[in-house]
Every structure is written in C-alpha cells, then in structure tokens.
Image: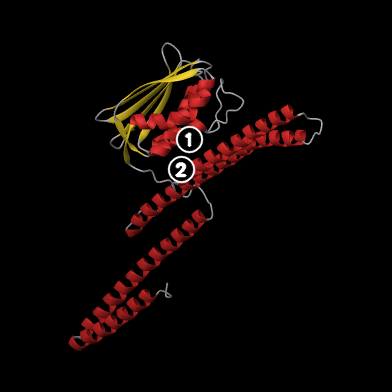
Amino acid sequence: MLRNREIRICLIISAIIIVGGTVAGYIIDRRAGYLVFALTVIITFAWSMGTILRYRKISSLANEIDSILHGKENIDLSHYNEGELSLLQSEITKLFVRLREQADMLENDKARLADSIADISHQVRTPLTSVNLIAAALLNPELDEEQRRAQVRDMQRQLDRIDWLISSLLKIAKLDAGTIFFRHDKILLKSLIDKAAEPLAIPMELKGQKIEADISGSFTGDLSWTAEAVGNILKNCMEHMEQGTIYVTARENSLYSEIIIRDTGPGIDKNDISHLFERFYKGANSSEQSVGIGLALSRMIIVKQNGTVKAENYKSGGAVFTIRFYKGTI
C-alpha cells in the first residue's frame, strides 16, 4: 500500500496535521494538545485501516479479473457489493458476461467456418475430379474427333461450375465481412426483373419454359446485386421444373416493394422449406449439380438491403418466393 504515491502523500499530510494540531493545542492548553493528538492519531489509524481493507479487496478483485482473463469460469463477484467497489463490480460483471458471449460466438464461428471449409472443399473437389478424369481421357490417342469435342464440352461445363462456385463463395465471404457497400438507386422493378432473367433466356428456351410478368413500380437498392439475388431464385425455379411457366408479379406500395415469383413445378418438399436458404443445404429434389449456395446468397443480398424473402408452396402446386424491400427499418 505504501508504494502508492497518493497514500504516501495522504500519510505525510496526516502527519503534518497531527504535529501542527498537537502543537497548536499544546500552546492553548496542555490537555487540549493531548486531546488533539489522540483524536488525530485515532482518525488517521481508522482511515489507514479502512484503506488497507479496501486495497485488499481491490487486490482480490484484481486477482479474480486475472483469473477471468486466463479462462476461469463460474467466478462469483457478488461479495464486492459495498461502497465504490459495488459500481466496479457491476461493470466488471457486465464485462465478464460480454466476454463470455463473445467467446461463445467465436467458438460457434470457428465451428461454422470449419464446416464451411469442409463443404467448400467437397464442392470444389467434385468438379475438379471430373476435370482430371476428362484430362486423362483426352490423352487417349484412340479418341475420335467427336468424342474429343464432347469431352472438351464436358470439361468446360465443369470449369464453369468451379468458376461460379468460387465467385459465389467470395461474394458470400465479402457479405459476411461487411465489405460490400450497396447503392441506393431508385430502380424500376421491370428493369430489375429483365436484368435478372436475361442470363436464363437461352436455357429456359431449350427447356420449353417461359416467364410471364406483371410488373409495376420501383424499389430503392443496388441493381446489380439485387438482380443476382432475384436471378438465383429464378434459376432455382427453372431447374426444378421440366416445362412450364414462371410467373413474376411485382408491385410497390407505401410500405414496401414486393416481388412474387411462382413456378409450375412440383413445389418444395415440406422438410426443406425451413432450410431452403441455409448454406450448402441440398433439398430432396435437388439435382446432382446443385451446390446449395445460390438461395443462401440471395437471402444475404436481400436482407442486407432491408428486405425479406420467404419460400412456400402454392395452393395449386409449385413453389412461391415472396421478396419484399421495405422503405423503412424493420
């Protein structure tokens, strides 16, 4: 305690007061001098004992904090509930709870990261294995020109899949890290749907599918990112039906801009609905080429723009996706 500069100063001041008070009292009257000396010594002693006890508690509290920092759990700070230490105890308890919450979040994040890395590794390894097998087959001198072209086309499809997969994973990582800044432009909903559907025109035509749209109004957001989100949903509808129609209805009101996408396919398995937007989740009706990140990416993009997306089955059959971009914070 005497190593504390403030304590040493207080003791020096107390000594000066004791000596000064005693001398002054002795000058007035000898008994007054004795009385002043006794009172000042008693007061100084009481203050010193109180300070010693307080510093012991502070030292004990410091040791407990050190234990917290070194990972000790179930620490009880409730006995520091007197005087000014109660305020410090309250704040330390809050800090301790917050540190525990952050530690739990970090553990959960590490577990999710490990699972994601395993999933990514599996998803990339599958097309890479196919590419290696095709490359080995192309070395066969007995292949005729038609077979060689078919193998090259298959390799190109696998490389395109790898490219899309890595690109989507990078976008998800950027969204997770909060490094994407969305534009806030006023955009016609028709322009959004046209941009989202454009890459699907040829594959839909080959499958005998079409889009019927009834669109009006606008929304405020980022055209490129939102078109990708809507495009992934349209692509999901396209992939889960052979022939048929995708109906797109879009409206704007005073609260939100709404896009409803409905297909005429078999619908969503009831066990898949609650997991549909989870990363790497593949539903019961998913194709072998499905990776399970397209809808997850769509949801992230929509939510980041103050929106919501919901999937359900239409009463007469087919899947329905409802997207809403709210004009105020929800």
Q: Secondary structure at mark 2?
A: helix
Locate the C terminus and report the quarter of the image it occupies: top left
Q: Is residue 221 visible?
A: yes
Color style of the picture: secondary structure
Q: Which disc number belongs to residue 59? A: none
Please name the residue shown 24% across and 30% down the image: 254
Dot 2, crowdedness within 10 Å: few (<14), some or many (≥20)? some
Tag 1 and tag 2, C-beta contact below 8 Å: yes
**What is the spatial separation of the Cα atoms under label 1 and label 2, in whole angstroms?**
9 Å
- In this figure, which residue is indicated by the disc labeled 1? 297
Furthest-bottom residue in this view: 27
Residue closest to the eye, 26 or 318 = 318
Q: Is residue 299 visible?
A: no
Locate the N terminus and report the quarter of the image it occupies: bottom left
Give how far across and how far down residue 96 sits, in percent: 44, 50
Give how far across and how far down residue 83 sits, in percent: 32, 58
Q: Along the polypeptide, which appears first: circle 1 or circle 2?
A: 2
Amino acid type shown at disc 2: Leu
Give how far across and how far down residue 94 sits, in percent: 39, 50
- In this figure, which residue is indicated by the disc labeled 2? 175
